[in-house]
Every structure is written in C-alpha cells, then in structure tokens.
Image (cartoon, rainbow, N blue to C red):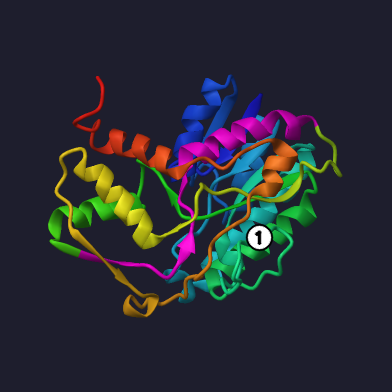
Amino acid sequence: MRVLVVGRIGQVGTELALKLPAAGHEILSLEPPELDLLKPETVRAAFDAFRPEIVVNAAAYTAVDKAEDDSALAYAINRDGTALLGSESARLGVAMIHFSTDYVFAGDKPSPYVETDPTGPVGVYGASKLAGDEALLAANPRSVVLRTAWVCSAHGGNFVKTMLRLGRDRPELGVVADQHGAPTFADDLADAVVALIPRLAAATAGDPGFGTFHLTGAPYTTWHGFAAVIFAGAAARGEKTPALKSITTADYPTKAQRPANSRLDCARITQVHGIMPADWRVSLDRCLTTLIGKQRNAAP
C-alpha cells in the first residue's frame, strides 16, 4: 500500500520510516520544501504525484512555550495545515491518521480523560492542535485523530535524552512530581499505525474505526517517576546518575501552562481496534539499549 507520511524527521516520522516498509508498505516521507504545510501548492503536488492510498500526519508545531508568542505560525501549521491535508486526502478518497495531544485538555480532571470529555486547552499549542483535529474530521470523515502524550524515542529531543544528558553533568536533579501521565514511545505509536492501516484503508465513512482515539504507554506515572526509572536503567548500564529530588510545577515555571493531569484512558482503541497500550518500561529499556547499550548484567 502507498502511504504518504507527512513529517519525516520527527520522532514518530523516523519510526514510521522503519516500521511501514518492514510491514510491506511503499512509503513517501516528506518535509519542507517538498511538502510544506504553509504552501498549499506543495501539498497538492505531493498528493497528485504519489497518489497515496492512506496518509499519516506526523508533522506539527510542537514548541509549546514559543507558541505563546507565535500563535499565528502555530495555527497556520497545526490548524490550517492539518485542514489542508484533510481536504487533499478527501479529494483523493483516502483515509488519514493524524497525531494529536493531551494538551487539548485543561488537565484539571481528577481521573484519566476519555475521548468524549470536554476539551479545554490552556495554551496556544493545545488550542491550535484542537482546532486542527476538528478541521480534519470536518474535512475528511475517514480520519483517525490519535491523541497521545509524553512522546519519547532514541531520536530527536525528548525527556529521556534530556535526563541522560543532565544526569551526566549534575550531582542532583529536581524533576516535577505533580504532573501525571504516561510516557509513550514513538516506535510503539508506529506499530499502532501499522495495525490501523488495513482496516482504515478499506473502511467507508461511518465505520467506528474512524474518529478520535487515545493511545499512550502504560502504566501512569509522573515525570519524577519516569526519571527514576530512566536513571535506574542508566545506572544498570554503567552511566553516572544524579540524586533525584521531587519538585512541584511551581518550582519550575514555564511560559506555557502544562496539564497537571495528562492521563488518557486508552480503552476505546483497545475495544475498537484491538490495540493495547505498550508498557513504557519495556519500551524505555529498548530505548536505553539503543542509546547506551545493554545492561551490564544482561545475558549476551
């Protein structure tokens, strides 16, 4: 199957470039200038040249703090660019998979969010992503909006790599312990896309396989809890690690507000598509092996 991947160099796009060909798909992964969400003519040209049978959008404006001062660009990419992909995929009569975020919620619910919970983004990034989600579903009903959170991998910039870098340089490190969620590894998200494609490509509008779904890793934790497991894995591989202390969100102010609760309930995607949340601790171990090497006491 011909799969157009929008966003080649991001964490998910990098993993899709590995997983989709391994599953037998022909893929075209594009970044600007070949496909620029700010230039509609490049989008149409890419669609017409490749004639995809399904589209996966892994591109987004994700600079959460910068978005507060650059809302025009955030909306141009996250809302207008996503709407454009939706209309172009609908024009060709193909399904689309699009990645969204926990930031569409306010983060003040005391329990995990389900897909039907009221949205209420508290910053530009989340608001622009929500606007894009809505525009996509309006433009192409044969779409899946896949909300996820706390994405990490062995590629690009992310929490795991930041912790490893800081851990080598600092004797002590404070990490926020009052934000709750679940780490999600990009290779697991790519596996989910591979699993979704056969059904979505064949399904017609109105199929329950389309719409909004949540998918993160499991179990839930905090940034502090995640860091503790990262450093335990790093220490087992001979890395220097810091003393870890708990801090609050107020102790680490940022320009944009972060959701205190980023826990997404993933039951629906399991019920509809049979996709289970991956254990992020297993995924982290795999990631650390890529970044550092095997544990010193691991079997050869």
Q: Position of residue 177 (x, y in %)?
A: 38, 67
> Looking at the picture, does residue 249 appear above or below residue 209?
below
Pick whichever, 31 or 212, lies toward us: 212
**Residue at the location (45% across, 75% down)?**
256
Which residue lies at the image location 51% right of the left edge and 55% below the top edge?
149
Percent x, y of residue 85:
67, 48
Residue located 48% across and 64% down the image:
180
Residue 170 in the figure: left or right of residue 5: left
Residue 166, picture quadrant:
bottom left
Q: Residue furthest bottom?
A: 250
61 vs 144, left or right, is left
Magenta residues span: 173-202
> Which class describes the residues within 10 Å of circle 1: few (<14), some (14-19), or many (20+)?
many
- In the rendered view, does 221 fall on the left or right side of 224? right
Q: Amino acid at mark 1?
A: Gly
Q: Quadrant of the N terminus?
A: top right
Rendering coords of residue 239 (x, y %): 16, 44
Residue bearing mark 1 = 132
Question: Which residue is nearer to you in this view: 70 or 216?
Answer: 216
**Magenta stretch containing residue 195, yes or no?**
yes
Residue 196 visible in image: yes
Q: Is residue 46 above or below residue 37?
A: above
Residue 77 seen in render: no
Residue drawn at 66 percent across, 60 percent down: 132
| Residue 130 inside the magenta-drawn segment | no
What is the number of callouts on the image? 1
- Quarter of the C terminus within the rendering: top left
Point out residue 191 in the picture as x, y percentages from the top left corner.
55, 33
- Determine the secondary structure under disc 1: helix
